[in-house]
Image: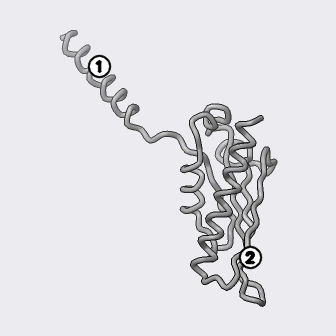
Amino acid sequence: MKPIRSSVALLALLAVIAASAHAAPPIYTVLDNSSPALMDQATAERLWKERTSAKLMRLYPVKKWGFVTEVEGGFDDAKVCVVTARAMMLPRSGKTLVYRPAKTATAFGTHPAASPQQCKTLAKAKLGEAIEAVSSALLAG
């Protein structure tokens, strides 16, 4: 009877190990407080995920840090697309972020005679620049 129990226990242990080996890697909490016409939550999360290195995650653990993005702007009277994009790293308290930015970066851009899609593309590019600036500053210091 004992060999069967140990076999069952071994199989259960192997199942747990296999499940943890295929578990998704941890990701940062990302909150997007942007103008819906320029940025959405999914795009902001994807930009952070694309630009997050293993070194950043090692130095600033997912359980202790998160990010906030803010992209604002639109068209002025002369039909020029004006965008400002801000990326911030904030400490976590449980599952929430505490508004005490550890690092912040802002990028600005304009595009004359832009279509709404071109303005949205500019917003994405500027948020990418702000994210790169935060990541670089964190890894440099």
Task: From the viewer's perspective, tell me whether residue 103 is left or right of residue 135.
Answer: right
Label 1 crowding class (10 Å Cα cut-off): few <14, some 14-19, many 20+? few
Q: Quadrant of residue 6?
A: top left
User: Amino acid under label 2?
Assistant: Val
The residue sitting at 69% across, 59% down in the picture is 69
**Which residue is nearer to you in this view: 64 or 1?**
64
Label 2 crowding class (10 Å Cα cut-off): few <14, some 14-19, many 20+? some
The residue sitting at 74% across, 36% down in the picture is 140
What mark, if any, has residue 82 been given in the picture? 2
Q: Is 125 placed above or below 10 here?
A: below
Pinpoint residue 10: horizontal percent, then vertical percent: 28, 18
Q: Quadrant of the C terminus?
A: top right
Q: Are marks 2 and 1 in contact (CB under 8 Å)?
A: no
Pinpoint residue 86: horizontal percent, then vertical percent: 74, 60
Task: From the viewer's perspective, tell me whether residue 4 is left or right of residue 98.
Answer: left
The residue sitting at 78% across, 51% down in the picture is 104
User: Amino acid under label 1?
Assistant: Ala
Q: Is 11 placed above or below 71 here?
A: above
Q: CA distance from mark 2 to mark 1?
A: 62 Å
Pinpoint residue 11: horizontal percent, then vertical percent: 26, 23
Residue position for label 1: 9
Say which of marks 2 and 1 sits in front. Answer: 2
Pinpoint residue 63: horizontal percent, then vertical percent: 63, 38
Question: Under tag 2, what secondary structure?
Answer: strand
**Which residue is nearer to you in this view: 121 or 52?**
121
Question: Under tag 1, what secondary structure?
Answer: helix
Task: From the viewer's perspective, tell me whether residue 112 is left or right of residue 121.
Answer: right
Decide which of tag 2 and tag 1 comes sooner along the chain: 1
